[in-house]
Image: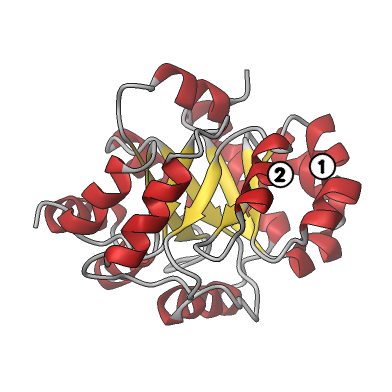
Amino acid sequence: MNKINQLFSENKDRKLLSLYFCAGCPTLEGTGNVIKTLEQGGIDMIEVGFPFSDPLADGPVIQSAATVALHNGMTLSLLFSQLKAIREEVHIPLVLMGYLNVVMHYGIENFFRDCSASGVSGAIIADLPFKDYMEVIKPIADKYDIRMIMMITPETSEERIRFIDDNTDGFVYMVSSASVTGAQSQFGDAKLDYFRRVNAMHLRNPRMIGFGISNKQTLESAQQNAAGAIIGSKFVTLLNETKDPQKALDELYDALKH
């Protein structure tokens, strides 16, 4: 069974926590250490970003991390080699996250083949049109047993959400707002209404809520309305500040208590 499906199947009564970081930032060779530290620290799933020069969906924190990673020399080829080196040591799902331009340049078949070979369970391509997903990407991803994770926002129609739910198998990424990534202090009534509206649809796939989660209030709001939460910018900031994944994780856990 794919590790993503297994994770949600085995943890229906527990709220999950997934973290995002950008491979190659703050250091080129730190990818494996970050992943192993997060798994040992109790994180359930990890999104590993591969950098792109024009990350439109990302706020300044993750844009900056991508710039650092590119300057450090991070490439998809290098990332896959780093992941292969730790494959036998990692047991939680890894999801690669990035942009279509990078995947196209690498080669779609090559990308999914190497995802499978390096122990990756899923992929998020933030700017992938759903039509292209259905016609081009999905058959190849399915061939290599890689779950394609699609995003929805407060502006996504119910019809579209149900179409995504019917044609994916992993989890639905609920973006908390239609803006870019970045930490928020709280979720307002409009976002909570969006969470409840999607919750009431009783989708087939589990949902994870991301974008803006950085403290106890936003974490609890996400966990009350989905299978769990995804934290990106807050952890990336702490990792850049501490240059130490264990310290960054400890500080994140502390921040989530307040």
Residue beneath the point at 55% across and 66% down: 155
The residue where tag 1 is placed is: 138
Q: Secondary structure at mark 1?
A: helix
Circles 2 and 1: CB atoms closer than 8 Å: no
Vertical arrangement, residue 229 with respect to residue 119, above or below:
below
Q: Position of residue 9 (x, y in %)?
A: 48, 19
- Can residue 239 be seen by looking at this rendering? no
Q: As drawn, is 115 to the left or to the right of 216?
A: right
Query: Is 84 or 175 nearer to us in this picture?
Result: 175
Vertical arrangement, residue 24 with respect to residue 152, above or below:
below
Residue beneath the point at 59% across and 55% down: 151
Query: Is 247 or 194 nearer to us in this picture?
Result: 194
Residue beneath the point at 38% across and 22% down: 11
Q: Position of residue 125 (x, y in %)?
A: 68, 58
**Mark 2 or mark 1: whose residue is earlier in sequence:** 1
Kindly give the residue lying farthest to the right in the view shown. Answer: 135
Q: As drawn, is 232 to the left or to the right of 135?
A: left
Q: Secondary structure at mark 2?
A: helix
- Cα distance between the residues tagged 2 and 1: 14 Å
Q: Which mark is residue 152?
A: none
Q: Position of residue 149 (x, y in %)?
A: 63, 46
**Which quadrant holds residue 75?**
bottom right
The residue where tag 2 is placed is: 163
Q: As drawn, is 224 to the left or to the right of 95?
A: left
Can you say which quadrant of the picture contains the C terminus?
bottom left
